[in-house]
Amino acid sequence: MTRSSFQPSSILFDKGVIRRVYERRVRLALGEPPTLLQVEAANSYARIGAITDRLYITEQTSNVLKLRTEIFAAPILADTRTLRKARYLRRWARRLKEFGFSPEDAIVLAYGSFGVDVDSKMVGVDAIITTDIRLADHYQQRYAEIESRFRNIVRNLPEDYAGLALPQVVTTPAVLQLL
């Protein structure tokens, strides 16, 4: 993937990215230096935010943030929108588990294709940003098989779903290189 091939207009941040962005804010407030992973996540978050305002998190991540200290969580919640589960999200997550993804990773990947922004009625995102290098590598290695399975599923869904696509899965270090 080159700089010119990575121009997403909608992004889903997995919980690892959001957790590290949150933790960085807490550490800075306490006068402690952030970790390298926290800095990578925060810089990726900022760079993506500079190119699009369609930043998403899952319902689960939103719920966790709402339980955290408001002064640190509120800016993240204000910057992002929460994707809701569309009709076929759980079914697609089950199929993704067959490719060897953990249940948690399968749900995040499924949100990338079948998560819905209820305000705009948009389904799916262009890219998922993650701190999980193994998830990104596994997704890339199995991409052709996953895409074939996805196309077969979408082909049998109502016409409204015909334009759905698989998202790119990009790690935070890759975002910093690409943008």
Image: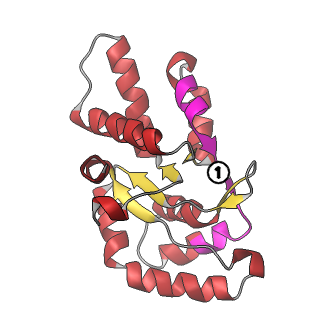
Q: Residue farthest to the front?
A: 4
Foreground: 67 or 80? 80
Quick check: 158 left or right of 171?
right
Residue 114: x and y, percent? 63, 65
Compared with 148, 74 (above or below) is above
What amino acid is labelled 1 in the image?
Leu
Quick check: 134 left or right of 56?
left
Residue 121: x and y, percent? 74, 57
Mark 1 lies on a secondary structure that is loop
The residue located at (38%, 27%) in the rendering is 23
The residue located at (24%, 30%) in the rendering is 35
The residue located at (49%, 58%) in the rendering is 104
Residue 105: x and y, percent? 46, 60
Mark 1 is surrounded, within 10 Å at the Cα level, by few (under 14), some (14 to 19) or many (20 or more) other residues, namely many
- Quadrant holding the N terminus: bottom left
Compared with 175, 95 (above or below) is below
Q: Is residue 37 magenta?
A: no
Mark 1 — residue?
Answer: 83
Q: Is residue 158 visible?
A: no
Specify the quadrant of the image occupied by residue 31. Answer: top left
Foreground: 93 or 43? 43
Residue 115: x and y, percent? 64, 59
Q: Is residue 91 magenta?
A: yes
Compared with 103, 141 (above or below) is below
Foreground: 27 or 100? 27
The residue located at (50%, 74%) in the rendering is 96
Q: Which residues are magenta?
A: 74-92
Q: Is residue 68 visible?
A: yes
Specify the quadrant of the image occupied by residue 163. Answer: bottom right
Quick check: 142 left or right of 76?
left
